[in-house]
Image (cartoon, rainbow, N blue to C red):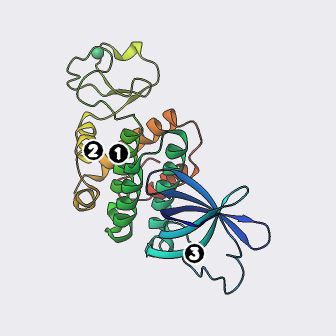
Amino acid sequence: MPAYPLRAIVLRKTKLGETDVILDLIASDGRIVRAVAKGLRKPGSRFGGRLEPYSDVELLLHTGRTFEVVTEARTVDPHAALREDYDRQAAAAVVADVLDKIALEGQSDPRLFGLGDATLEVLETCAVDRLPTIVVAFLVKSMAMHGYRPELDACVACASDPAGSSLFSLSGGGVVCEACGPDLAASERFDPAARAWLNVLLSSTMAEVAQSDIPAEAVRDCFALMRSFVGYHLPARLRALDFYAGVAASAPGWDVG
Ligand SMILES: [Zn+2]
């Protein structure tokens, strides 16, 4: 069986047996690939530290009986700072967790790899107080790629201008006017000002998001809404997102978790 190349980001490492590791990877075409790295946990492994979570790597794989098997690994970008800083690590874990769940569920979408790559890039280099903004932007963009782009400009039930409505329907996937609101289940209160910021995040690149100056209160409101939205539409529990909510709650302006 000939080896083949794969460009991928390492999302997660799981121990297998005495010395091996299973890698959850998102490939550049957006597929999730599970591959075993044999002997990775042996001292002096030939893979060295090249297969750590959030690393962007070029691999050679062959197809094994149960998993793909990594035969060679070359680093494209180690994203090392994401593993050395508590807040950056917590934010990067959200990216890895959400990509894993979305890519597994949906059809492969190469935009997911690009989004993940761009997000990890800015999470590594941005000012620490911008981390929550980047996480929110990632959540809304990844959900949009997954087919759940939030409707923010018209009521999802009657298409009217929602004006100053502060209702968002999780099931309907967008804002609802005050007249329709009571009829829709699973509605959340959401500050109309934060709604405008969510639109800004959707239309900005990750590099622009990292430079943006969105008020902490708006980021907090957007985060709370997107956390509910993601939780409503992705069936699996997102532990990294729950954990990040606790981490972000200590940021200035975030008096609720
Ligand atoms: Zn309506």
> N-terminal of the two: label 3 or label 1?
3
* Cβ atoms at labels 1 and 2 below 8 Å apart: yes
Between the C-alphas of marks 3 and 2, the distance is 37 Å
Q: Look at 40% across and 63% down and name the residue there.
A: 120
Q: What amino acid does circle 2 point to?
A: Leu
Q: Look at 72% across and 70% down and name the residue there.
A: 20
Q: What amino acid does circle 1 point to?
A: Lys
Quadrant of the snapshot with the N terminus: bottom right
Residue at disc 1, secondary structure? helix
Q: Quadrant of ligand 1?
A: top left
Residue 164 in which image quadrant: top left
Q: Position of residue 240 (x, y in %)?
A: 54, 53
- Would you say 100 lies left or right of 177 here? right
Decide which of 196, 193 is in the foreground and name it. 196
Tell us which disc is closer to us: 3 or 1.
3
180 up-or-down from 41: above or below: above
Extreme residue toward the bottom, this view: 44
Report crowding for label 1: few under 14, some 14 to 19, many 20 or more residues within 10 A (C-alpha).
Answer: many
- The residue pinned by badge 2 equals 202
Q: Position of residue 204 (x, y in %)?
A: 23, 50
* Cβ atoms at labels 3 and 2 below 8 Å apart: no
Residue 141: image tag: 1
Decide which of 52, 156 is in the foreground and name it. 52
Mark 3 CB near ligand 1 (8 Å cut)? no
Q: Look at 48% across and 40% down and name the residue there.
A: 107
- The residue pinned by badge 3 equals 72
Q: Where is residue 59 in the image (x, y as percent from the top left)?
A: 53, 69
Residue at disc 2, secondary structure? helix
> N-terminal of the two: label 3 or label 2?
3
